[in-house]
Amino acid sequence: MSAAEIAKLKQGQPDPSELFRYPLNKSSEPWHGVHGFEAGSFSTVLATLRADFTRILAEL
């Protein structure tokens, strides 16, 4: 595939920071790596945190 063909295909693609919701630093540059937010996965973290706090409060 030529460079011109690749450039043409990229024109129709959204910016990766929009597509994967990568966080940006203060200079508006994307962070390195995949650090996207996915609410379904985060809800399990919150549920675990709630259970931990409930257990700790019961001990007080």
Image (cartoon, rainbow, N blue to C red):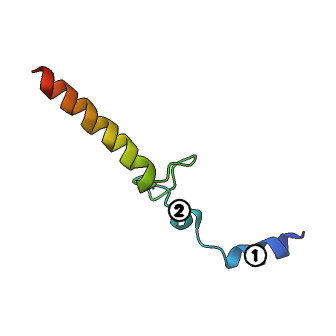
User: Quarter of the image containing the N terminus?
Assistant: bottom right
Label 1 residue SS: helix
**Residue located beneath label 2 in the image:** 17
Viewer-nearest residue: 2 or 39? 39
Horizontal side of 21 relative to 49 (left or right) equals: right
The quadrant where residue 27 appears: bottom left
Horizontal side of 6 relative to 12 (left or right) equals: right
Viewer-nearest residue: 4 or 20? 20
Residue closest to the far left: 60
Residue 19: percent from the left, percent from the top? 56, 66
The quadrant where residue 3 appears: bottom right
Horizontal side of 44 relative to 12 (left or right) equals: left
At a point 52% along the width and 67% down the height, the residue shown is: 18
**Residue located beneath label 1 in the image:** 9
The quadrant where residue 14 appears: bottom right
Q: Amino acid at mark 1?
A: Leu
